[in-house]
Image: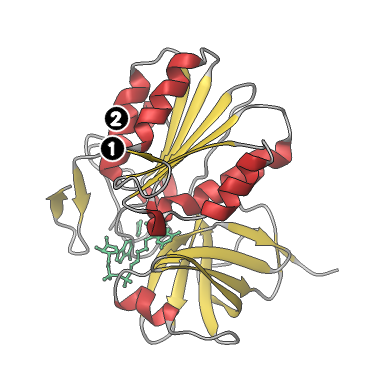
Amino acid sequence: MSKKITSFDSQPTMGKIIRIEDECEDTKNFFVEMPKKIEGVKAGQFVMLWIPGVDEYPIGVAGFKDEVLELGIAKMGAGTEALFSKQIGERVGIRGFYGKPYKPLENVNHLLLGGGFGMTPLKLLINTLKSRNRGDKIHVFEGARTKNKLMYLDFLQNLHDKEEIKFHVCTDDGSWGYKGFPTIALEEVLQEDSRQSVIYVAGPERMMKVVFEIGKKYPNVKDMQMSLADRYMRCGFGLCSACTVDPTGWRICIDGPVFNKEQLEQITDFGEYIRLATGEKKRI
Ligand SMILES: Cc1cc2nc3c(=O)[nH]c(=O)nc-3n(C[C@H](O)[C@H](O)[C@H](O)COP(=O)(O)OP(=O)(O)OC[C@H]3O[C@@H](n4cnc5c(N)ncnc54)[C@H](O)[C@@H]3O)c2cc1C
Ligand code: FES
């Protein structure tokens, strides 16, 4: 019987890129075949992706099936550009799986809100919630600057058409969905449906802070779980302290990246300061 993977160790395990798909502008889906079956990875967890000779950086898990890991990656700088130049059959290193995941509650409405590469852990979360099949309502709110920047548009629209989720989509320029921010539709749902809800968010931290302040106004919001993945990480597993937040000293890589409402209340850096690669703090 083949050994199953829930965790690779702290050394990279080499995997082979077996499929590359264009997702949206400057964003691709990479499917990486690992040597062993992957199991038990949860939405919100991440891997450290090593591009030999170039860089290593954190990437959220968008999905996995048997030995194949799905990663959704936006081109940013030298490290992600090097990945985008890779061809099918080439190898990359994977460390992980790391971090605390989302912990979906039961008998609630699930309100998932994201933007940019924040949509990757939410894709896995949607599939997790669907597979639980408890009949809870799943709303997904996605916003981007313009239509070409919307991630997983076909995947989400298809689920909406099959009535498996309710998809609320918007763009800043009105090129797809309504014109404006995802928080508009979020508030509409919170006002119209008094059932207990949990809000799950991933995306730019300033946007998450806005959602957090909105969520606090509604007594029907039972919890808010947000992934502070818009931050610098070096080791990914608690050794270097590059990712600490004040005043708690929590390391985002092992104490997060997903934090709940009670924890977020305690992080004064949340939505205010990030830490640069030098360790210096910078206002967001
Ligand atoms: C937990 C977590 C999950 C992530 N998941 C995804 C994902 O699913 N898809 C995706 O496209 N991106 C994801 N990222 C962001 C990704 O790590 C950065 O975009 C990537 O490191 C950029 O590298 P670069 O060399 O191309 O860009 P650079 O030019 O080096 O940097 C561009 C920007 O990327 C960020 N960045 C650079 N290096 C790091 C690093 N070591 N750690 C964190 N941020 C860094 C900085 O904000 C920087 O301003 C995630 C980050 C974290 C912390
Ligand atoms: S990245 Fe090293 S402790 Fe978090």
Question: Percent position (x, y) of residue 125?
Answer: 58, 44
In the picture of the structure, the residue carrying the numbered disc 1 is 248
Classify residue 225 by image quadrant: top left
In the picture of the structure, the residue carrying the numbered disc 2 is 266
Q: Secondary structure at mark 1?
A: loop
Mark 2 C-beta closer than 8 Å to ligand 2: no
Residue at (21, 50) in percent of width and height: 274
**Three-letter amino acid code at disc 2?**
Gln
Q: Classify the position of the N terminus by image quarter.
A: bottom right
Q: Residue 251 or 19: which is nearer the viewer?
A: 19
| Farthest-out residue, right | 1
Q: Residue 251 or 214: which is nearer the viewer?
A: 214
Q: Indicate which quadrant contains ligand 2.
A: bottom left
Q: Secondary structure at mark 2?
A: helix
**Three-letter amino acid code at disc 1?**
Thr
Let me know if residue 222 appears in the view.
yes
Foreground: disc 1 or disc 2: 2
